[in-house]
Image: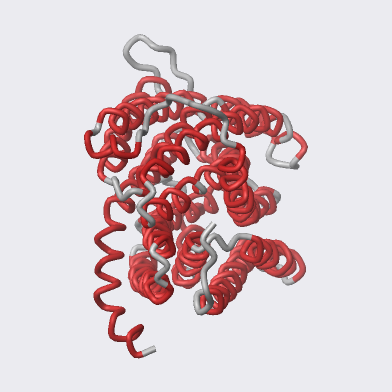
Amino acid sequence: MNRLIHSLGPEIKKTLILSLPIVVGQLGQMLMSVVDNIMVGKLGAQALAAASIANSLFMLVMVIGFGLTVAVTPLTAIAYGAGRDEECGIVLRQGILLNLFFGIVLCAITLFLSECIQFLNQPREIVGPASLYMKVLGFSMLPLMLFQSFRQFAEGVSFLKPAMIITLLANLVNILANWIFIYGNLGVAPFGLTGAGIATISSRTFMALALMVIIRKSSKMQRFDPTLNYRKIDLPMMRRLLAIGIPAGFQYFFEVSAFAASAIMIGWMGTIALAAHQIALNLSSISFMVAMGISSAATIRVSTAVGKKDIQGTRLAGFSAAILCALFMASAGMIFILFRFFLPTLYVSEKEVIDISATLLVIVAVFQISDGIQSIGLGILRGITDMKIPTLITLAAYWLIGLPSGYFMAFNLDMGIYGVWYGLLISLTASALFMMIRFNSKSQKAILIH
């Protein structure tokens, strides 16, 4: 315990250094979403509300894909920590096969779900635009899954800067494509909200191809053989990837589906409430992307320690990441409170939407630390390949505790949109608490290396 306490400072510094390029990359991806919402918001509250419901449903599909791809990172990092370089390349190649297959499946699911918007009792004027926008987003799944495969592999061997740089450059591609396709420029007809989906496909295709070329050509990566020269379909490796990827996909799904269900409930309250919800959610996602970056760094450090069979190092990496994330998220909460009336004006000019968003940002500020810690908890448990119990914790926190509480407060206690968001606060707090208890217990025992 003494070593744990005295080593936290240096460990926090190591996690911070490792997490910086990942955080910048995460913020780069989030910035694309923020830009999309700002540029779509110029079309009015109706377009923003349509984007909200479509993005909420698409996220249900996309996060399953994210979950499937993150399995590449801990397996690569464990092999890297153990000095098994050839195995790192095997993880990449088998991961690409699996992820592209699931990318096709998830695209088909997105097309199906886009037809279900009409049955969700949403405002009639947003159903058509939301459905078409979601269909276009579905076709971005394949380049996204390819990019994620290479990115997670690169993170596993701590080759972090290329993905960060590519993501930042992709923002320029996204802004230009939005300008062309949303508003109609350079001789192209205006597509409105659908144009934002076309821009998303363009930017994600650029990201996937650029990262694939850099990793395959980099001299630093040749020791891992990051080529696509398949010798065989490695079923044992695929089973290991699925053993982590499928539960991780469900973990993300349970959390994001709770937010999607919240958006649907808020949609029953009208377009104004839904637009305010989208603004608050989008802003809170910015700080969450930083938490996700720190979580990814924690996964890498924990997995590498597991590969070295260093149990104490595993605990230090996990707890230092939690402290670092809590400090950042507390700072973010203060910013949300101080600028709660200004930030919504970046999206819309309607006073009613701005006022509701400002109040929601106070709730967002309160749950920042819980949101960050639950993300870290998932990441460090994933680093020790502990998947089943954390998945059940996520299910219980959001669907058995948080959502019913939010529904009750919103409709039985007449708290409206604020009741839904208090339910989300309860969900995140419960998840954070149980994740850290789980890690503290598991990390004190011998870690099984698969």
Measuring 68% from the left and 32% from the top, which residue is drawn there? 109
- The quarter of the picture where residue 303 lies is bottom left
Judge whether residue 41 can be spotted in this image: no
- The quarter of the picture where residue 33 lies is top left
The N terminus appears in which quarter of the rendering?
bottom left
x, y percentage for residue 131?
Answer: 64, 29
Q: Is residue 230 above or below residue 357?
A: above
The one of 34 and 235 positioned closer to us in this rendering: 235
Compared across the picture, whether 157 is left or right of 219 comes to: right
x, y percentage for residue 438?
Answer: 57, 74
The one of 103 and 212 positioned closer to us in this rendering: 212
Q: Is residue 110 above or below residue 433?
A: above
The one of 38 and 370 positioned closer to us in this rendering: 370
Judge whether residue 377 can be spotted in this image: yes
x, y percentage for residue 310?
Answer: 40, 71
Measuring 70% from the left and 41% from the top, which residue is drawn there? 122
Disc tally is 0
Compared across the picture, whether 187 is left or right of 231 comes to: left
The one of 397 and 368 positioned closer to us in this rendering: 397
x, y percentage for residue 385?
Answer: 54, 60
The C terminus appears in which quarter of the rendering?
bottom right
